[in-house]
Each structure stands twice: as C-alpha cells, then as structure tokens.
Amino acid sequence: MTEQTQPSPREHHFYVAIAKFLFHHPEHGIVSARDPIKIKDAERYGLSPLLLYGLTVAGLPIRRMTFTPVDQPKAFRDVLLDAWRNAEGLRGRPDILRINRHLATASPELVGEMAKIGVQVEVADAREKSLPASLRSAQDASRWLLRKHDGSDRSLTGSIQALCWYAQVDHDFRARDGHRGVNSREVEDRIQQWMTLPAQVPEQTVAGGLDWEPGPWLSSWETSLPPDQPRYFNHDGFDGCTWLLTGKKAPEDIVEDDDFWADSDYDNAAEIAKNLVARWPKPPAEIAKCAGISLRELQWFTSGKAPLDLHARFDLEALLGIEYDERIGEYVGIGPYVLMASKPLALKEVYEAISNGGDACPCEIVPRQGAADPSWRYVLINTYGEPPSIVMAPRGVKITERLPDLLMNYDGIKSVTPEFYRDVVSTCARACREPTANIREMKDFAKRYEAHWASCAWRPE
C-alpha cells in the first residue's frame, strides 16, 4: 500500500513599503515617476508618498496590492484578511506567511494573531531572495496600474480608491487569464493547479487599531538613489495618466529638426568612462578612490543617473585618458591603455574607439624562443600613427577565443623577440599595480618603440 502524498503547504509573501514610483498630487491625482525619487525631493513637486501593501503567492506571478496614504496606514491584520477574503487568486489564507525582519519587529503581535486562524508566520533570513524579489516586482508593476484616469476626483481619497480598484482588476485578470502566453508552460500549469485549490477563506473579524509601528525601513530603497535631477510633469494623452519624467521639458515653441550639428554638443563622456572602467586592470572601487569619488558616485555617473562635480569629472577624465575631440564634437578615449578582456561588448566598443573604427591590425604576440606567459595572452593593438595599446586576455576563458571576432581586422598570432615579449609582460604587470599606472606605463612603453609606430601601424618583427 503506497502512502498518500501530502499536499505542499500554501505560502504567501507579505511585504509593506513606501511606493517607489507612485505619488499623489493635488492637481494631477496619482502620478507615476519614471525613475525613483527620494521622498524629500518629491515634496518639492507637491507629491505625497503612498504606502504599498502586497501579497504574492510564493513561486507564482499572482499578487494582490493595495495602497493608503503614508500618514493613514492600515493594520496588517485588516490588509491580510481583506486580501484573503476578496482576492480570488490568493485562494484564501495560506499555511505559511513569509515576512521580513522589519515587519516582524514592527508588529510583534502578528505571529500570535495569525496563529489563531491557522497561519504560521515565518521570518525570512538575510539570504532569502524570493521575498525581496516579490517586493521589487510589485514596486515595478505598480506604476502601470492606473492605465486610465477616467475619474474627475483627483483628491487623495478619490485617487487612492481608483488606484486600489485598478489593483484589484489587475489581480483578477492575472489570476484568471492574464498568465496565458506570458509565462512558460511549466508556470502556466502550476498556476492552473494553484487555482484549483479550495479557497481557505478566514472568518470576518472585528477591526481593531493599528497593529504595527512604521519606521525608516519603509523607504530603505532611497539609500541607493542618485542625487535628484530636474524633472517635469507630462500628461499622457493616450491613457490619460500623468508621469513625472526625468530631464528638462523641451520648450513647446521649439521644433526639432535633423540638422547635422544638432548633436554637436553631445556629452558621451559617461558612456566612454563606463566602457573603460569595465576594461581597466583595477576594479571600479579603486578607480573611484583615485578620482576622489565614491564607488556609488562613479556608478551613477557611468550609468547616466547623475553628473559628477566638475573637478571630480576632470580628475576621472584625466585618469581614464578621456578628452574632447572638437573635430567630431564628442569625447574620446585617447589612451594608450592596458585593457582587460572580460566583457565582449565593452571591449569591442573600446577597441573600435581607440582604433578609429578598426583602423588597426591587432595581433597576439608570442615569444620566438622560450615559454609564453601561462596565465595571460597579450594582443597588441597597433593603430596607425598612434601609440599602441595592449589587451590582456586570461587563458582558458570563452572571451579569449572570441578575440578574432571582437577585434576588427585581427591579424593572427605574431612571434616577437623574447626581449620585446618580456617588456610587454612587465609593462602590463606595472600597469596593473594601481589605476593611475595604466596610461603612464603605456606611454613609457610607446616611447621606447616610438620609431616603430609613429608613421604607420607597427607590425612586430
């Protein structure tokens, strides 16, 4: 006689946070921010933050969200019971309710309250990935809830009622038919199985007072945001929603054309820096330190999220060998460099930039006599009339085998004198000691062989 398998326990993720993308404005109603904005910065635009409460079925794209003003929070107990009674896709109460440590600390009585209705509360540890992922997914999805602002009531109460209604509609759609054609067949099958479970609807209880203590953890996502940039309101005529967009609103009386010179002041320094940092022999944290900025400031700058202080930018450009080329109206990396081969796209873009679109004959060098470096392969980028750069590629990794495809006009493997090979290896070793040594060592290397490359692309003998 075979034992009957026990059904897996039902599990919901419960999370609460200040919404990253949704705010209320007295004139526009609910406003969606295209990029996250700090609460204090949002206040300058007349925006008030909202609280997001969410429940997600563990392992499935089924969730239910609701919202309140930050200064009018709902009791956890009331949010949970309302969702379990009215959100069909949740199938009633779960067996396990997973929360983070902040919710557990904010509501010490939640464990006991849930135990009374047969729900076991479990606190996720710091290594838990699925619970934070459920919160991030809900935050991202929330900005698209209010598809059409068809109501005339833009008050705080009226706007939140409309937002919650759309959140319920979104839940109902995704729980019934919204998953079709979106997820894998395996996920679709699991959703179908989940929806066949009988609903464990809890009994209605008398609402009590607030059962949790709000705290700074509600807006912990603010710590990773860059300094605020100019923003403006934009009314979307298609769906009637209002967005807070990053940037400066173009004057309505200026009509853009396709003039060739329209982009002559295009600032591509951040893009150049991003590719160089990805190929630099030293890690980004050390580059940032040498430039007198934090790693986060470097990341914000290279991703285009925030500008650098003018002096810091000059220092970073000097460190990375970035200069403005008036002939083409853009910034360029002039080098010469020692570059590390790890990310294919960044390597390809840096190579094409320093070789003026592939105007070079890059080749791997090996010693005519003696053994080659057992750890690294060295590719000489011998551009026409410019100092050479060197690509260091670790042996045995996939990108090293792709170098002929990534480096335009690749000229194969060339044998060189043992003395020259040793000079390349030692130059690269010195260039890798600190961020500021890279260009310095390569310039010294170029001077030693200036006669070879000054008039043409030097081919090692």
Image: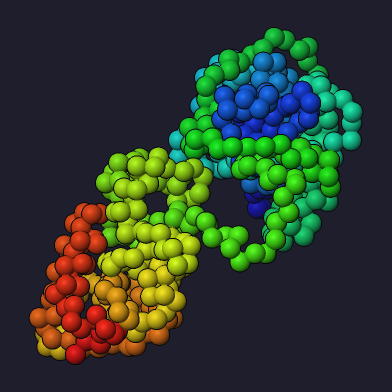
Classify residue 375 as left or right of residue 278.
left
Residue at x 58% of width, y 63% of height:
261
Way the structure is coloured: rainbow
Q: Is residue 460 visible?
A: yes
In this figure, what is the number of numbered marks? Answer: 0
Depth check: give the residue in front, 415 or 91. 415
Depth check: give the residue in front, 46 or 339. 46
Depth check: give the residue in front, 232 or 193. 232
Classify residue 170 as left or right of residue 337.
right
Q: Is residue 211 above or below residue 326?
A: above
Residue at x 81% of width, y 21% of height:
155
Q: Is residue 87 visible?
A: no
Classify residue 255 as left or right of residue 293.
right
Residue at x 74% of width, y 57% of height:
182
Q: Is residue 337 above or below residue 54?
A: below
Query: From the image, which quarter does the C terminus lie in?
Result: bottom left
Residue 304: % across, % down: 50, 49
Q: Is residue 239 above or below residue 53?
A: below
Residue at x 84% of width, y 47% of height:
238
Q: Residue furthest top?
A: 209
Residue 89: quarter of image: top right
